Image: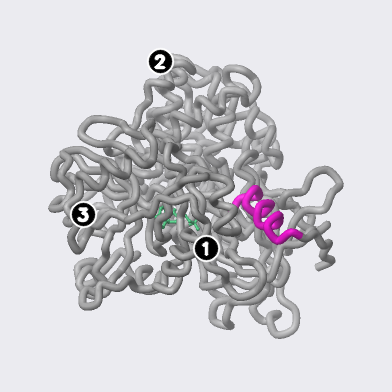
């Protein structure tokens, strides 16, 4: 009844591309989206994006990037479309004159309002530009006040009456989050490079700019308008989160000394990473994946206003729940209670937070990311008046492995996660994970001393007892950040309860796709593929070589897999798929085990 149009999905019919002011027609973008949808190879995807970006004008490029990532702006400033399935159905009723029952029936057949719209809308005139559609969606998103739902419905149905059926498919899929293209930031960056050079050679310059401002629209605009050299002028600025520096692992205190020599040793606090931007009394906070958390952590914002002497600053630290009577930190499970969207005031009283500040990136109008760590930390200490809400993480400067060992033991005896070692003269390298920062964590039970964050890419139907859930195991991948791919590392069927399995299935069915997603590489075939979206934390006995997994696989060599994996907790809502453990980390963990076995599981 309600079928996809394969000829449309595959072939791009290049219509007259420009309308006034060098702007791209929305129909042109839609042709590209259909082409991207039909691709299962990342390289093809990058090349297609390259052509799209080449054809885009300076005005179009940012809206195009946001729309292909199902957004209306950078990820750190999410503008919720405010268009759910019920509203989409209602707008279709208005736009097509069909009854609600007809629309619902069609939807039941194909499970996609985009396809329903395509089927019902017969208009052939391509009137609107990309910018028109972007502006109209933004207008719908920002509509508020009395009668919001009616206003939004009217605006959306107006929009639907001005597009073709094929355009309508995407006009609905974008706000409903159903594009399912899975275009990650690295693919966009490489696409930008392709648009000029036909290869990915400009990615480092593009990535540097992106790491600093976290806004691919802004980066693409400068790149398009002024060329690659102009990207250098994108600087750290208060209000734009900086992509956070990350740590590598060490296996021992000696390992740290061998790599860093004399270095700063700090406690590794187990809470939420916070990047705090202060401009006068205006304080904003961002999480590790650059989501704004200001509303959640208002007590820390208050502390910053009171205790930070600088007028403008960007600082980082770890926020942890603590017991005001004893001054002791709570474990992560308690701190986690603060990550919620309701009862915020009550939570600040029940579980107050303290920020352990450890880095300073910007102070009183000056970007200091280029200064050494020791200097930045010293400046940080000089602008904070320590009190309950904000304190500076103390550190020990040493090159003595025994002293480091002692510090480590004290940290874990005190209930902390371990230690962080920092190279004294290291710059703050936005978005980089390297040995400027090294973590040494306490061991978990089992041989593998660390947990692995994996992304679910599919599931297998259960056998035996699990058959009644229709789900028995997950196919889980890690992230290859160099190639923007997800490669499998485990088939995991342990760790969820009988209540959690059906929940998991329901969540996964909402993001199921009928073929292997373009960014996933796998040998093992699950029964159901899903978009790489949900991150789970896993523990395992060890990492082994495995012919049936693709993580770290080169040519005909086996890949790497988790042996006896089990899930800890449920979905890690604080992590995006790209925040999962990387292939490189898996290889490092494997190297630290110092053995190599081939597993048959
Ligand atoms: P992991 O999440 O295991 O890769 O460890 C890195 C995280 O440790 C950072 O993102 C911070 O959230 C956290 N952390 C805790 N204490 C510190 C510290 N003293 N310096 C830097 N990061 C820290």
Instruction: Let me know if residue 116 appears in the view.
Output: no
Magenta residues span 581-594
Q: Quadrant of ligand 1?
A: bottom left
Q: Considering only vertical position in the picture, is 410 above or below 500?
A: above
* Residue mark closest to the camera, 3 vs 2: 3
Quarter occupied by residue 590: bottom right
Are discs 3 and 2 less than 8 Å apart at CB? no
Quarter in which the N terminus is drawn = bottom right
**Residue 301: numbered disc:** 3
- The residue labelled by disc 1 is 441
Q: Is residue 590 magenta?
A: yes
Some atom of ligand 1 lies within 8 Å of the CB belonging to the residue at label 1: yes
- The residue labelled by disc 2 is 20
Q: Is residue 304 magenta?
A: no
Q: Residue at x 30, y 73 (%)?
A: 328
Dot 3 or dot 2: first in sequence order is 2
Q: Residue at x 28, y 58 (%)?
A: 355
Dot 1 or dot 2: first in sequence order is 2
Q: Nearer the viewer, residue 251 or 368?
A: 251
* Secondary structure state at the residue bearing disc 2: helix
Q: CA distance from mark 3 to mark 1?
A: 29 Å
Dot 1 alpha-carbon crowd within 10 angstroms: few under 14, some 14 to 19, many 20 or more: many
Can you give x and y, in whole percent of width and height, for residue 569 in the image?
A: 51, 73
Q: Nearer the viewer, residue 383 or 262?
A: 262
Q: Residue at x 25, y 52 (%)?
A: 148
């Amino acid at each position: 009844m309600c079928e996809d149009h394969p000829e449309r999905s595959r072939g791009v019919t290049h219509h007259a591309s420009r309308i006034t002011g060098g702007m791209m027609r929305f129909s042109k973008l839609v042709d590209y989206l259909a082409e991207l949808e039909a691709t299962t190879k990342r390289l093809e995807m990058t090349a297609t994006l390259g052509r799209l970006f080449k054809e885009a004008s300076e005005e179009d490029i940012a809206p195009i990037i946001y729309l292909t990532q199902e957004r209306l702006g950078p990820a750190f400033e999410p503008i919720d479309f405010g268009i759910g399935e019920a509203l989409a159905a209602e707008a279709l009723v208005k736009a097509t004159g069909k009854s609600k029952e007809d629309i619902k029936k069609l939807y039941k057949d194909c499970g996609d309002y985009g396809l329903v719209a395509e089927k019902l809308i017969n208009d052939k005139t391509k009137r609107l530009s990309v910018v028109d559609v972007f502006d109209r969606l933004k207008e719908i998103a920002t509509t508020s006040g009395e009668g919001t739902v009616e206003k939004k419905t009217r605006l959306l149905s107006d929009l639907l009456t001005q597009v073709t059926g094929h355009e309508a498919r995407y006009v609905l899929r974008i706000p409903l989050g159903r594009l399912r293209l899975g275009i990650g930031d690295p693919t966009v960056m490489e696409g930008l490079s392709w648009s000029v050079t036909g290869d990915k050679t400009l990615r480092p310059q593009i990535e540097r700019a992106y790491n600093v401002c976290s806004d691919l629209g802004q980066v693409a605009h400068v790149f398009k308008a002024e060329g690659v050299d102009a990207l250098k002028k994108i600087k750290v600025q208060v209000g734009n989160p900086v992509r956070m520096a990350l740590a590598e692992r060490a296996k021992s205190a000696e390992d740290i000394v061998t790599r860093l020599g004399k270095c700063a040793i700090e406690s590794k606090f187990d809470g939420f990473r916070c990047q705090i931007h202060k401009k006068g009394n205006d304080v904003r906070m961002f999480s590790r994946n650059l989501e704004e958390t200001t509303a959640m952590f208002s007590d820390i914002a208050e502390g910053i206003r009171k205790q930070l002497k600088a007028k403008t600053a960007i600082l980082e630290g770890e926020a942890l729940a603590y017991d005001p009577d004893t001054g002791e930190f709570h474990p992560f499970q308690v701190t986690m209670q603060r990550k919620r969207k309701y009862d915020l005031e009550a939570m600040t009283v029940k579980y107050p937070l303290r920020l352990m500040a450890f880095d300073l990136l910007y102070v009183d109008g000056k970007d200091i990311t280029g200064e050494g760590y020791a200097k930045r930390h010293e400046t940080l200490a000089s602008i904070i008046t320590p009190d309950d809400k904000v304190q500076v993480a103390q550190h020990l400067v040493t090159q003595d492995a025994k002293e480091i060992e002692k510090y480590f033991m004290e940290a874990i005896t005190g209930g902390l996660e371990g230690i962080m070692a920092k190279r004294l003269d290291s710059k703050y390298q936005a978005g980089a994970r390297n040995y400027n920062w090294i973590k040494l964590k306490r061991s978990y039970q089992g041989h593998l001393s660390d947990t692995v964050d994996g992304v679910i890419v599919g599931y297998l139907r259960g056998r035996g007892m699990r058959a009644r859930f229709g789900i028995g195991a997950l196919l889980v991948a890690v992230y290859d950040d160099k190639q923007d791919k997800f490669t499998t590392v485990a088939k995991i069927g342990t760790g969820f309860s009988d209540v959690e399995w059906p929940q998991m299935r329901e969540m996964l069915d909402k993001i199921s796709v009928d073929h292997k997603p373009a960014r996933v590489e796998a040998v093992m075939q699950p029964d159901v593929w899903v978009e790489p979206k949900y991150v789970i934390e896993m523990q395992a006995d060890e990492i082994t070589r495995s012919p049936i997994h693709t993580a770290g696989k080169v040519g005909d060599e086996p890949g790497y897999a988790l042996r006896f994996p089990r899930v800890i907790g449920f979905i890690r809502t604080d992590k995006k798929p790209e925040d999962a453990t990387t292939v490189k980390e898996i290889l490092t963990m494997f190297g630290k085990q110092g053995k190599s076995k081939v597993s048959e599981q």
